[in-house]
Image (cartoon, rainbow, N blue to C red):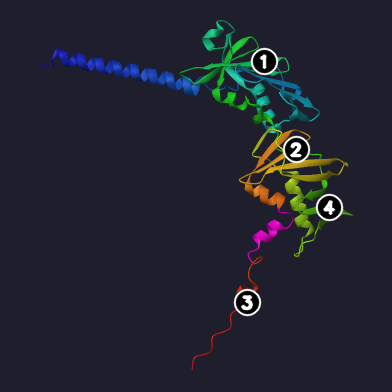
Amino acid sequence: MAPPARLTTVRTGWLINLVLLALVAALAAYALYGGGKDDAAGHPLTSVAASVVKRIVIEPRDGQVIELNKDGDEWLVTRPLRARANLTQVERMLDLLAVRGSDRMPAEDLQRFDLDRPALRVHFDDAVIAFGTTNPLSQQQYVLADDSVFMIGSHHRSVVPERVERVLTHSLLRKNEKPVAFEMPGFKVTHVDGKWTLDPPQASTVSQDDFNRWVDDWRYASSLLTQPSSGKAPADTISLRLEDGRTLQIGVLQQEPELILTRTDEKLTFYFSQDTRQRLLSGPGAQAADDDPTADADPAATQTPPAAPASR
């Protein structure tokens, strides 16, 4: 006996819906995982090589313009203030020049991609990359470069800082700033005749390795955050005399709950962890003493107790 006509129609409708659903899913998967990826054989956004770039300008639509300029091997922030730049952050931005985009389109009808008034522009010398909206299906970013519109991975935009704090150096000292004397609150460390000395001397022996580790902690101190100086007066001052004869004044703004130091010459404020505070301010040899479990132990507590009398 043949099935009712109504049941056949229902089954046919379900099959059509399933086929359409599978087709939509396949197209979405292709756009998201196939056609949406940056392709090594895709289109270069610009013809500019990262190695020749001397100037970077970041222009957020609703934010502050940030400008960086290369000075020898060093990058400097020159707007809105003058300071050392974070080289790692600069290199991440320069990597944008190596990105290859997909779906190259003529720069027409830019409002479709929010590129008539882009949220962000980045200038690499004379080359400009502008960031528009994202494709709702593939989640790829529309960018305008070299008079064309491309699609690139949306994660690329995150490498461009829109606040100056994100591009400031984390290094308290420059690479060529080598201290030979420290005048700390409560003690002095000086390099004389090839050896480091501590004044006043500690009761326990401080080895030259202890001194070298402590000096390196200062030379390579890296902040969690760097900000423009607020102009607040420091509670203490640390003087560092350098190998070239210059003297740096490092202001101590705060020690708890985090160490905050400021360089008056650069008008920058550096935020450090409590572990870094301990290493920098406690002096050479302090870390080794902290690691020695017997350093502060009661001598009586470390003596071997007398043996119990033998039972009869």
Q: Residue at coordinates 62% horizontally, 76% vertically from top-left?
A: 303
Q: Nearer the viewer, residue 292 or 135?
A: 292
- Residue located farthest toward the bottom when viewing the structure as drawn: 312
Magenta residues (range):
282-293
Front position among marks 4 and 2: 2
What amino acid is at disc 2?
A: Arg
Could you give the CA–CA distance between mark 3 and mark 1, rounded to whole angstroms? 74 Å
Q: Residue furthest right?
A: 193
| Residue topped by disc 3 | 303
Relative side of 302 to 13, left or right: right
Q: How many marks?
A: 4
| Distance between the alpha carbons at the discs numbered 1 and 2 | 34 Å
Q: Residue drawn at (74%, 46%), measured in percent from left and top?
A: 218
Where residue 34 appears, as percent x and y from the top left, is: 49, 22
Type of residue at label 4? Thr
158 above or below 101?
below
The amino acid type of the residue labelled 3 equals Gln
Q: Which residue is mark 4?
A: 190
Q: Which residue is mark 2?
A: 263
The image quadrant that residue 21 belongs to is top left
Count residues near mark 2 (Cα–Cα under 10 Å), then give few for <14, some for 14-19, many for 20+.
some
Q: Secondary structure at mark 2?
A: strand
Q: Dot 4: what SS?
A: strand
